[in-house]
Image (tube, rainbow, N blue to C red):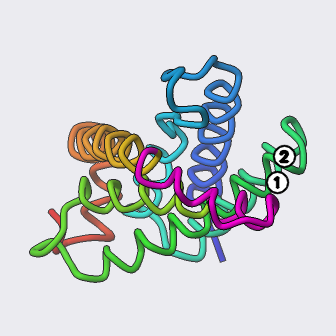
Amino acid sequence: MMNLREMLYVSLLTATATIIGLFESSLPPFFAFAPGAKIGLPNLVMIIAMFTLSGKKVWSMLMLRLIITALFTGFSVFLYSAAGGVLSLAAMYLIKAFGPKLVSIIGISIAGGFFHNAGQLLVASIIAQTPSVMLYLPWLAFFGLLAGFAIGIGGNLLIRRVQPINQLFLQRNQIWS
């Protein structure tokens, strides 16, 4: 059971990730030569959540964010976002399990960027009924790795320098400090 403070924190993170995601989806593509390539700013919030909340709360945040965003963007966007988000978060938790001696917050975020794109392309290949869509993976993965790196740096800085987030991080992750 969540206390009021936790509930507010989860709600604020979910709302922040949703608003950032809606804002980012309204922007024109950053790279005209790479359709669909985005920075993935909501993942900045998810990285912070992974290190300050329990896994169950983070998965709930993801699902809630996806559902709320789908109300504004439509079902097809939901399919791609859900596939990317679920695969990305699962990969990040799997890699996080290796511990801080083997992987950093930045490394976890980079993996998330790659697997987010892989999940979206898997859905696209199913919808298009052709595996040739996966030929776009190396190109899109490059941008996913760059975006994951940038998000990881941002998440690491926020976790380390924003005092309330840093306190939650230290409470939950003594070995990562």
Q: How far from the left and from the top, in percent, is residue 48?
A: 41, 52
User: Residue 97, relative to residue 120: is it above or below?
Assistant: below
Q: Which residue: 43% across, 63% down?
A: 50
Near mark 1 (Cα within 10 A), the count class, few <14, some 14-19 or many ≥20, is some
Near mark 2 (Cα within 10 A), the count class, few <14, some 14-19 or many ≥20, is some
Quadrant assignment, res 151: top left
Nearer to us in this view, 149 or 157: 149
Q: Which residue: 36% across, 45% down?
A: 142
Q: Which mark is residue 70?
A: 2
Tell me if label 2 and label 1 are in contact, CB under 8 Å.
Answer: yes
The three-letter code of the residue at mark 1 reads: Ile
**Left or right: where 39 falls relative to 103:** right
Q: Secondary structure at mark 1?
A: helix
Tag count: 2
The three-letter code of the residue at mark 2 reads: Ala
Name the chief secondary structure element in magenta.
helix
Q: How far from the left and from the top, in percent, is residue 160?
A: 21, 45
Task: Determine the CA span between mark 2 and mark 1.
Answer: 5 Å
Q: Which residue: 23% across, 82% down?
A: 98
User: Residue 93, relative to residue 7: is it above or below?
Assistant: below
Q: Which residue is tagged 1?
A: 67
Q: Which residue: 50% across, 25% down?
A: 33
Q: How far from the left and from the top, in percent, is residue 150?
A: 31, 37
User: Residue 116, relative to residue 150: is it above or below?
Assistant: below
Q: Magenta segment range?
A: 121-139
